[in-house]
């Protein structure tokens, strides 16, 4: 699973999964702006460093115990727009994993829309995958394909684990041990990623946070930021 097909040495390993998602939270009034932005065929110029370390990263430790880190400017503006526009025509209602069957199903706990890129689908995706691998210090082949999720006004994904608990996925010999979220849009209100097991950081001003985010560690979506 997620190991190279042509390398006998690396086939011996059963890598854990990295779940890599790109998110953009949109108000209904902004939906058309996404469609009218940079066309999917307009590839970003190769001026943004392929290695994130070359881009002077700014890291904020949100929780040392839970190992939650926030990085600024992980993607370029052009990369964000490219991913959004290429993903938009392929979006469909998001599903959840059935704990009994291991298959995807529709459930009201998750109302977003989403899609998956194939791993290494094009040069831009490959560049981003390498950047993620460098930052997380894990091989590219340990990661799943990039997933893009869109949350419009009123949509949600209730509290959940990205780890697989069903027997079918566990039997495949691998599981998710880390999630990386990259925000593709900055929104004025809502759209926070909330860690429901983590308390509100001391001294945080709750003004501007959604009601569900006021009592826990929460991260507002800011374009090009990367949450590990």
Image (cartoon, rainbow, N blue to C red):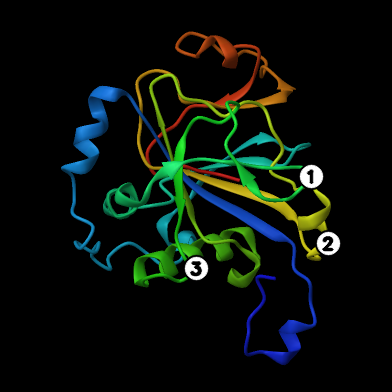
Q: Which residue is mark 3?
A: 119
Q: Secondary structure at mark 2?
A: helix
Residue 70, image quadrant? top right
Residue 185, image quadrant? top left
Q: Nearer the viewer, mark 2 or mark 3?
A: 2
Q: Which residue is mark 2?
A: 171
- The answer for how far apart the CA atoms under marks 1 and 2 are is 13 Å
- Residue 120 x, y percent position in the rendering: 46, 71
Disc 3: CA contacts within 10 A as few (<14), some (14-19) or many (>=20): some
The structure residue drawn at horizontal position 58% and vertical position 24%, both measured from the top left corner, is: 218
Q: Which residue is mark 1?
A: 100
Left or right of 46? Residue 8 is: right
- Residue 158 x, y percent position in the rendering: 62, 26
Q: Earlier in the sequence, mark 2 or mark 3?
A: 3
Q: Earlier in the sequence, mark 1 or mark 3?
A: 1
Tell me: residue 64, above or below residue 89. Answer: above
Q: Nearer the viewer, mark 1 or mark 3?
A: 1
- The answer for how far apart the CA atoms under marks 2 and 3 are is 22 Å
Disc 2: CA contacts within 10 A as few (<14), some (14-19) or many (>=20): few
Residue in front for this viewpoint, 143 or 47: 143
Left or right of 86? Residue 222 is: right
Q: Nearer the viewer, mark 1 or mark 2?
A: 1
The structure residue drawn at horizontal position 57% and vertical position 29%, both measured from the top left corner, is: 157
- Residue 163 x, y percent position in the rendering: 74, 46
Residue in front for this viewpoint, 166 or 101: 101
Tell me: residue 50, above or below residue 212. Answer: below
């Amino acid at each position: 699973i997620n190991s190279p097909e042509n390398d006998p040495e690396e086939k011996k390993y059963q890598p854990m999964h990295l779940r890599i998602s790109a998110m953009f939270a949109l108000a209904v009034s902004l939906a058309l702006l996404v469609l009218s932005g940079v066309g999917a065929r307009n590839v970003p110029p190769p001026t943004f460093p392929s290695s994130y370390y070359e881009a002077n990263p700014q890291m904020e430790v949100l929780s040392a115990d839970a190992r939650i880190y926030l990085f600024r400017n992980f993607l370029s503006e052009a990369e964000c727009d490219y991913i959004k526009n290429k993903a938009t025509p392929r979006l469909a209602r998001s599903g959840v994993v059935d704990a009994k069957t291991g298959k995807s199903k529709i459930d009201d706990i998750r109302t977003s829309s989403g899609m998956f890129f194939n791993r290494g689908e094009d040069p831009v995706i490959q560049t981003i995958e390498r950047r993620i691998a460098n930052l997380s210090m894990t091989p590219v082949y340990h990661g799943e394909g990039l997933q893009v999720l869109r949350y419009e006004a009123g949509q949600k994904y209730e509290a959940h684990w990205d780890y697989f608990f069903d027997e079918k996925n566990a039997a495949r010999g691998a599981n998710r041990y880390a999630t990386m979220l990259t925000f593709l849009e900055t929104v004025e209100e809502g759209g926070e990623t909330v860690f429901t097991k983590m308390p509100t950081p001391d001294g945080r001003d709750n003004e501007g946070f959604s009601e569900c985010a006021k009592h826990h560690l929460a991260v507002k979506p800011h374009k090009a930021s990367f949450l590990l």
